[in-house]
Image (spheres, rainbow, N blue to C red):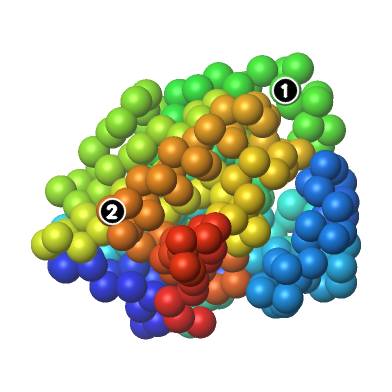
Amino acid sequence: MDTALTLGRVQVSAFTDVTGPFPVKISHLFPEVTPEQWAPYREAFPDTFVDADTWQVHIGSYLIRTPERTVLVDTGLGPAPPPFFGELRGHLPDSLAAAGVAPESIDTVLLTHLHPDHVGWNLTASAKPVFPKARYVAHQADWDTFQNPNVQRALGFEFVDKTITPLQKLGLLDLVSGEARISDEIMIRPSPGHTPGHICVAIASEGAQALILGDAIVHAAQVSEPDWRFSFDMDAEAAAATRKRLLDQVEREGTTVLQCHFPSPGVGLIVRRDGGRRRWKPISG
Ligand SMILES: [Zn+2]
């Protein structure tokens, strides 16, 4: 088992679903940011670029094991993503199996939000849960948003009725609003902007703490440039405000941060050099 982080009595492991070129060019993902502005981040984080205008995206999940619970955060892109994602295909179950993690050992699946690269392995092609003993947890506001036909149409590709809606019909979905406690060590923290019901996952045990950011931040450059507008943020202003609030908080509290779209394992700290800008400092990997 490849443990990315130990926090008191809790172990967090990182699993890769897929790594590859993101289908939308960086200049479209961040339309207001020039290649010159990207230059220092191309230098600092070369493994996040295929070329100057192509993001090498990592899509992953985190497994949190407490003495009582086994919780998976996000289920990746899955085996049959919308054609939008090109050649990218997920392999999360293989990654879990290679580490000896049986699907039935997972009792809870937390979905940071309901974009297709976070829900891909919720269900099999025949609408059976991939994690057969798990409750699936998402935020009510994301359920409401992604059930809206106008939102589905605006996204331009179908996935909701394959990977999300059947969970409710099967009685496996728990929708939360506001902060929610999952276990003694795990809390859900709403962080709207990327999607209306986006959540971060806070872990605390014996004085150690970490925060799984979901897509509140998707690229390490945003640690230094929280105002850069990311075109998949559904509410750009709220997303920027959430990024700044989260960065203030984790910097102040020295919280370890985990990010599924950073190169695996995506574990690090928010630091400043000589009182300058914040920057991402990976801890391992
Ligand atoms: Zn994502």
Q: Against 190, is 24 above or below? A: below
Q: Disc 1 and disc 2: Cα gap in Å?
A: 37 Å
x and y percentages locating residue 152 in the rendered image: 74, 26
Seen at 53% across and 33% down, the residue is 241
Q: Secondary structure at mark 2?
A: helix
Seen at 55% across and 73% down, the residue is 264
- Viewer-side residue, 73 vs 120: 73
Residue that carries the numbered disc 1 in the rendered image: 151
Residue that carries the numbered disc 2 in the rendered image: 253
Q: Which numbered disc, 1 or 2, marks the residue closer to the eye?
A: 2
Quadrant assignment, res 151: top right
Q: Amino acid at mark 1?
A: Val
- Viewer-side residue, 234 vs 20: 234
Q: Against 195, is 30 above or below? A: below
Residue 279 visible? The answer is yes
Disc 1 or 2, which lies upstream in sequence?
1
Q: Residue furthest left?
A: 206
